[in-house]
Amino acid sequence: MNSDTQAYDVIVIGAGHAGCEAALASARMGCATLLLTIDMDKIASMPCSPSIGGMAKGQLVKEIDALGGQMAKITDSSAIQYKTLNTSKGPAVHSTRTQNDKGLYSRNMKAVIEQTRHLDLKQAMAHELRIEGRTVTGILDQTGFEYSAKAVVIATGTFLQGTVHIGATKIQAGRAGEFSSIGLARNLAGLGFSVDRMKTGTPPRLHADTIDFSQFAVHPSSDALKPFSFSTKTISNPMVPSYLGRTNARTHEIIRNNLQHSALYGGISRAGPPATALPLRTRSSNSRNGKATMSSWNTRAFTPKKSMPRAWATACPWRSSTRWSGPSGAWRRPRS
Ligand SMILES: Cc1cc2nc3c(=O)[nH]c(=O)nc-3n(C[C@H](O)[C@H](O)[C@H](O)COP(=O)(O)OP(=O)(O)OC[C@H]3O[C@@H](n4cnc5c(N)ncnc54)[C@H](O)[C@@H]3O)c2cc1C
């Protein structure tokens, strides 16, 4: 250990959703904890759909809440729409899903972290694990600063060797606009860990002023707002609707004609379909008549002007994404 070393009980690498919970749990147990992250303004960021919960995931959020975690509380403090899914079935399979204000979610989680005793938050990129024998003793960041710890938790999400594909364009990034974590990935591989990438996708973001919302069905919040957290007494944010539409034959024609430009279907990316965000092409072929895909638009989840079509994850280049989501009329209102 050199004289510049800072000592902790626990170091958590990554202030995403998992890292925040790990760091809070450790600090609340009284352990001197360091939470290290690449960008302090992107804490608990939602890279895609700004939604929490849904089938299976909603149950997990409630379990985290029951165990004293933070996610459900932050969800309630930043939600702008609540839905209870599966209400036609019994209560055991009901699921809560919210749409959230992305910025508010992140700011609220950051505020809790900053106010938690025994928890230090630092912006730095972990580069290397320090190992003695077969025991981890700390980490080295990319500037050469060393931190010692009795335990290190790695919660680096999509960042290890992260790569973004947009059609044929390939960029090294953890998420859009953020560094990829390359040094740590190489270090872990050198230590004998198997390091690979999982894959997901995301829809294009559209300017709300360019969308004719009168062509969509309004999709409001559930009448009875059921908080995620057992400790939430009131929900104070105003609720905001989404808008529901279906693709049509024109949308599917544009997709078919542009599939060769897609990183997924044009053979550019070697990975299979994503686990989290199903691409629009896959949804198209899974839909009952092979033509119509239900999709809803979050209007306010990012900023009042930035809108996002849920269920439209794509790896196509900008030009073809713009054509099918643009003013060519590739939408129709769902039958009620
Ligand atoms: C484009 C896109 C779309 C997605 N869509 C969905 C979706 O629809 N549904 C869904 O459930 N999931 C989706 N995901 C997956 C999503 O990443 C995870 O669900 C969720 O964010 C994982 O949380 P996490 O805490 O594991 O990691 P993340 O939220 O990815 O957080 C990782 C953290 O680690 C930090 N970090 C990484 N390397 C280092 C390092 N070396 N040193 C310091 N800090 C480091 C980063 O700065 C970041 O704060 C999507 C991901 C992407 C990129």
Image (cartoon, rainbow, N blue to C red):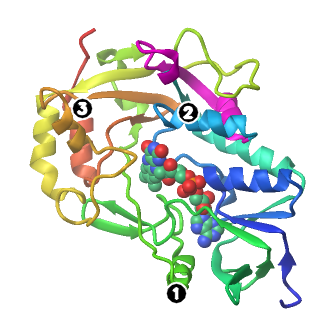
Point out the tag, 2 or 3, that comes first from the N-terminus. 2
The amino acid on which the numbered mark 1 sits, given as a three-letter code, is Gly
Q: Residue at x 26, y 41 (%)?
A: 280
In the picture of the structure, the residue carrying the numbered disc 2 is: 59
Does the magenta-highlighted stretch encompass residue 111? no
Mark closer to the chain start, 2 or 1: 2
Residue that carries the numbered disc 3 in the rendered image? 327
Q: Secondary structure at mark 1?
A: helix
Q: Residue 156: horizontal and vertical position, in percent? A: 57, 63
Mark 2 neighbour class, 10 Å CA radius: few under 14, some 14 to 19, many 20 or more = some
Determine the CA span between mark 3 and mark 1: 50 Å
Pick the quarter of the image with the C terminus: top left
In the rendered image of this protein, does residue 227 appear above or below residue 180?
Answer: above
Residue corresponding to mark 1: 190
Front-most of 283 and 136?
136
What is the magenta range? 69-93
Q: Secondary structure at mark 2?
A: helix
